[in-house]
């Protein structure tokens, strides 16, 4: 069975930084893409950033402030978030699109980690 698990998150003051990590584990043949979404109360889930085999994509609000990176050998994606603002408060979810050793395509989601930006 394949799963992804997040770590990081927490409470930070406006202007501060946080680093989220996500690890995919299990019987993985190949990761097609991996990244982060977020959902604030009463809002729809939106793309934060994801990384594919050919490049990276960021949500408009993340450009210039957030950096996504991948440690391919560890099946880990990191999200460095800088200059955080109260509007960044949300639950952040890790997502992966991958092929298992049985050649099955799956898209597991993590449980989510809370990021709260408040003075």
Image (spheres, rainbow, N blue to C red):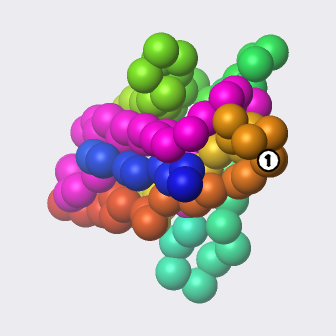
Residue 48 percent location from the top left of the image = 61, 46
Query: Is residue 22 toward the left or the right of residue 19 in the image?
Result: right
Residue at image coords 23%, 56%:
10
**Residue 16 on image: x %, y %:** 26, 39
Instruction: Pinpoint residue 82: horizontal percent, then vertical percent.
Output: 38, 32
Q: Position of residue 79 (x, y in %)?
A: 45, 33
Is 26 covered by the magenta stretch?
yes
Residue sticking out furthest to the front? 102
Left or right: 74 in relation to 55: left
Left or right position of 88 against 104: left
What residue is drawn where x is 46% and y is 41%? 25
Q: Is residue 99 magenta?
A: no
The front one of 19 and 88 is: 19
From where the camera sits, is residue 11 visible?
Answer: yes
Q: Which residues are magenta?
A: 9-38
Residue at the extreme bottom: 42
Residue 111 to residue 1: above or below: below
Residue plotted at (50% across, 43% down):
26
Going 69% across and 73% down the picture, which residue do you hit? 44
- Disc 1 is placed on an element classified as loop
**Which quarter of the rendering shows the C terminus?**
bottom left
Pick the residue in front: 105 or 19.
Answer: 105
* Magenta: main secondary structure: strand
- Is residue 49 among what the camera can see? no
Q: Residue 113 or 60: which is nearer the viewer?
A: 113
Residue at mark 1: 104
């Amino acid at each position: 069975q394949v799963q992804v698990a997040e770590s990081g998150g927490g409470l930070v003051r406006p202007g501060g930084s946080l680093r989220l990590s996500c690890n995919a584990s299990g019987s993985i043949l190949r990761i097609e893409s991996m990244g982060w979404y977020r959902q604030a109360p009463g809002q729809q889930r939106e793309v934060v950033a994801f990384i594919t085999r050919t490049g990276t994509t960021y949500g408009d609000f993340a450009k210039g402030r957030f950096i996504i990176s991948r440690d391919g050998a560890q099946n880990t994606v990191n999200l460095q978030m800088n200059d955080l603002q109260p509007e960044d408060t949300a639950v952040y979810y890790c997502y992966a699109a991958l092929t298992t050793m049985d050649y099955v395509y799956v898209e597991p989601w993590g449980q989510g980690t809370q990021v709260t930006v408040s003075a």
